[in-house]
Image (tube, coloured by chain):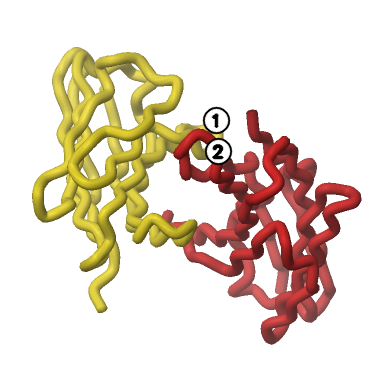
Amino acid sequence: AQKVTQAQTEISVVEKEDVTLDCVYETRDTTYYLFWYKQPPSGELVFLIRRNSFDEQNEISGRYSWNFQKSTSSFNFTITASQVVDSAVYFCALSVRGAGSYQLTFGKGTKLSVIP
Amino acid sequence: EAGVTQSPTHLIKTRGQQATLRCSPISGHTSVYWYQQALGLGLQFLLWYDEGEERNRGNFPPRFSGRQFPNYSSELNVNALELEDSALYLCASSPRTDSYTFGSGTRLTVV
């Protein structure tokens, strides 16, 4: 069975601070994908990144960066110089190709509040 | 390219009634996934449809059902509604390659 743990339920930061959202996953499969989604108050899930299990390169996209470490089964997400528009709930998710099933397993989410 | 469309946006039903939620996937996507986001429970997988067939379902009772039409759009039906069915229902479409695009959801309120 797959499991994703986001230990931080809520985080508050002051605008322009850096913030890291933690994600730890569990799976016995060797082939899997990890995702981060952003859910603003409007409700839709906005795709941020997908990373496959064979690619441990860190990625940077503007103010966003992701650190994938298979040794610790972690896929952490850092926002640099946070802005009020970053306020949202962020979900980490896992997809494995086991038994023909492809659905996402989500963490409980981390609610980020950026205070002006 | 049009995104994933869900309707209605909001739905209010009385306990015991039936609710029907609809999802239109991105053109060319053959898979549709349904998720329930209830308060305090996170996002939970409900159903997966691909090529018109139900391929997998999550840990939900049989009164949660659905179907996928030849044009790959999908319906989620919830029978005998209970108060705890109140939630945001999200649909995602996929070309079956570990890529998922979500709709804006249907917020179901059971009173």
Quick check: B32 above or below A68? above
Residue named by callout 2: A98
Residue named by callout 1: B41
Label 1's element?
Answer: loop
Amino acid marked by disc 2: Gly
Q: Where is residue A23 in the image (x, y as percent from the top left)?
A: 76, 50
- Which quadrant: the C terminus of chain A? bottom right
Pinpoint the chain carrying mark 1: B
Q: Which residue is at the far left? A: B70
Q: Is residue A95 shown left or right of residue A51?
A: left
Pinpoint the chain carrying mark 2: A
- Which quadrant: the N terminus of chain A? top right
Q: For the residues carrying marks 2 and 1, which lies nearer the camera in this image?
A: 2
Q: Quadrant of residue B27?
A: bottom left
Query: Relative to the observer, which residue lies in front, A57 or A79?
Result: A57
Res A42 seen here: no
Q: Is residue A33 shown left or right of residue B96?
A: right
Query: Relative to the observer, which residue lies in front, B89 or A11?
Result: B89
Q: In which quarter of the image is residue B110?
A: top left
Figure chain in yellow: B
Amino acid marked by disc 1: Leu
Q: Quadrant of residue B25?
A: bottom left
In the rendered image of this protein, which colour is used for chain A? red
Q: Position of residue B18 (x, y in %)?
A: 15, 23
State how far apart marks 2 and 1 are (Cα).
24 Å
Q: Residue at x 11, y 45 (%)?
A: B69
Q: Position of residue B54 (x, y in %)?
A: 27, 33
Within 10 Å of disc 2 (Cα), the crowding (few <14, some 14-19, many 20+) is: few
Q: Which residue is drawn at 34% across and 15% down?
A: B61
